[in-house]
Image (spheres, helix red, strand yellow):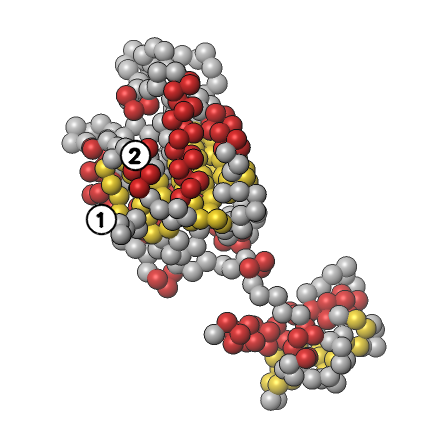
Amino acid sequence: MLSFHNKIINGDSLNELKKIPDKSFDLVFADPPYNMQIGETLRRPDASKVKGVDDKWDQFESFKHYDNFCKSWLIECKRILKDNGSIWVIGSYHNIFRLGYHLQNLNYWLLNDVIWRKNNPMPNFRGTRFTNAHETLIWASKNKKSKYTFNYQSLKCLNDDLQMRSDWMLPICNGKERLKKNNGKKIHSTQKPEALLHRIILATTNKGDAIFDPFLGTGTTAVVAKKLGRKYFGIEKDRKYFKAACDRIKKTKVIEEDYLDVIVNNKSKPRVPFGSLVELGILKPGTVLFDPKKKFNAKIMVDGSIKSKEAEGSIHKVAAKIMGTESCNGWTYWHCNVGGSTVLIDSLRQKFIAQKSI
């Protein structure tokens, strides 16, 4: 059986996609041809030519031809996605609305559109339109029922403990990261920055997941996937792009295993009610709980509730009453005495969860 992990191939996506078994990948990232409608040569104020996207691979006979092309690869990508997998597609105003239309018609379930704001976009030299300072990404799950991956806590941590928004300010690919020929010209006209793929892969996959890119270009998806400990597979039609991708992937080092763990979402953690610790005898009825400063105490009742002079109820409700707040996390408020040592009751819960997962 052919392996579709940690390799890339030089070929036509529409042909090669058909060879991939059903439900092979956790994530698809697709950066397809944009079908940009550029009618004339673009020039700077000094009359020098602007090197835009005028490659043959980005040109289609008609919108109908482009639509048929998009539907074909999107159908195949849905087939090879696992049931709980998701897909990202990226485009400009030339094509992103058509892609969104096809995604919905094929019963993908749209989760977000994300605006990639470029903090160093190419100026509009003619002054006849707004500067194109962004591209749009669409993130969708395979279907409405898919239990897709979203590492909310990791994204929040990445963003200084603020919820990650759907507008991302990231630079375009330049500097040492930009692949160039010996004459100094770009190898690929639309090479994506690694920072963009880092955020996408970190957000919507886990260590060891398999990621597929049907339009690999110079290999950014595979490079970042390899760094982050994910499996990758990509297809690239252009021979020179493929060769550049091979060289780039070969030079890429995997981040050490110890540093690949991400923060587990609270929703992904096993839920252990306080009453379970009482039922299992980890905490016994009559045990005295006390606050961090040992000013207040409460006793555990047989039903998992606690009773103090101030209130009775759940560990959260009683703690909130004592604190004078609407809510309070009782797990991190209450302590107890275990073998002569003061122990946070949450540490008893975490110990139980750890033993349960072994």
Residue 150: x and y in percent read 51, 50
Kindly identify the residue that appears in the image at 30 percent across and 48 percent down: 4
Residue 5: x and y in percent read 30, 51
Residue 76: x and y in percent read 39, 37
Q: Which mark is residue 15?
A: 2
**Given the image, on which type of amino acid does mark 2 rest?**
Asn
Q: In the depicted view, which residue is nearer to us: 358 or 54?
A: 358
**Given the image, on which type of amino acid does mark 1 rest?**
Lys
Please tell me which of labels 2 and 1 falls first in the chain.
2
Q: Mark 1 highlights which residue?
A: 251
339 in relation to 253, above or below: below
Kindly identify the residue that appears in the image at 75 percent across and 70 percent down: 314
Quarter of the figure with residue 69: top left
State whether residue 52 appears in this view: no
Gap between marks 2 and 1 measured at Cα: 29 Å
Residue 98: x and y in percent read 48, 25
